[in-house]
Image (tube, grey):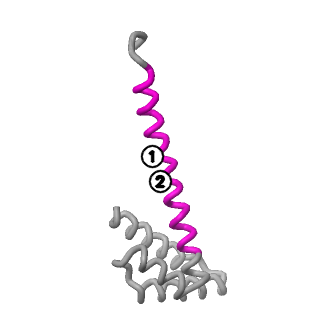
Amino acid sequence: MRNEDPEPLQAALDKVRNKHSQATAELHKLEQLRDRVVEEGDSAIGDVLELYPAADRQRLRQLARQANKEKKAGKPAKAFREIFQMLKELNEDSI
């Protein structure tokens, strides 16, 4: 190893580290999109459909309404998590 050039190894390590950062950033974008869907409703759902044409508008609307009801009632955020899972699956399918 002492005779090996460290630059290719460093480049490979940087690539792996960057991949993790990109995945984290992607999850943050999805979280923000989920928050918009819950808060803004139909206008944000329209944005989701532009990004992911395969998305189910009706299901997203149902989940957004349910998430708002759960939030007001102080119940666990089941629908909130379902919206995130749906967005995550749509994002993975689009890649």
Q: Start and end of the magenta stretch?
A: 6-35
Q: Which residue is drawn at 44% across and 71% down?
A: 87
Residue 94 vs 72, above or below: the answer is above
In the shown orientation, is residue 67 left or right of residue 16? Answer: right
**Callout 1: helix, strand or loop?**
helix
Q: In which quarter of the image is the N terminus?
A: top left
Q: Do the residues labelled 1 and 2 touch (CB within 8 Å)?
A: yes
Q: Quadrant of residue 50?
A: bottom left
Give the amino acid at mark 2. Answer: Ala
State the predominant SS element of the stretch in magenta. helix
Q: Which residue is drawn at 59% across and 84% down?
A: 40
Q: Quadrant of residue 5?
A: top left
Q: For mark 2, does the 10 Å Cα neighbourhood hold few (<14), some (14 to 19), or many (20 or more) residues?
A: few
Residue 57 lies in the magenta-colored region? no
Residue 32 locus on image (x, y percent) = 57, 69
Q: Quadrant of the C terminus?
A: bottom left
Who is closer to the viewer here, 32 or 85? 32
Q: Which residue is drawn at 34% across and 66% down?
A: 94
In the shown orientation, is residue 85 left or right of residue 75? Answer: left
Q: Mark 2 points at which residue?
A: 23
Q: Name the residue under label 1.
A: 19
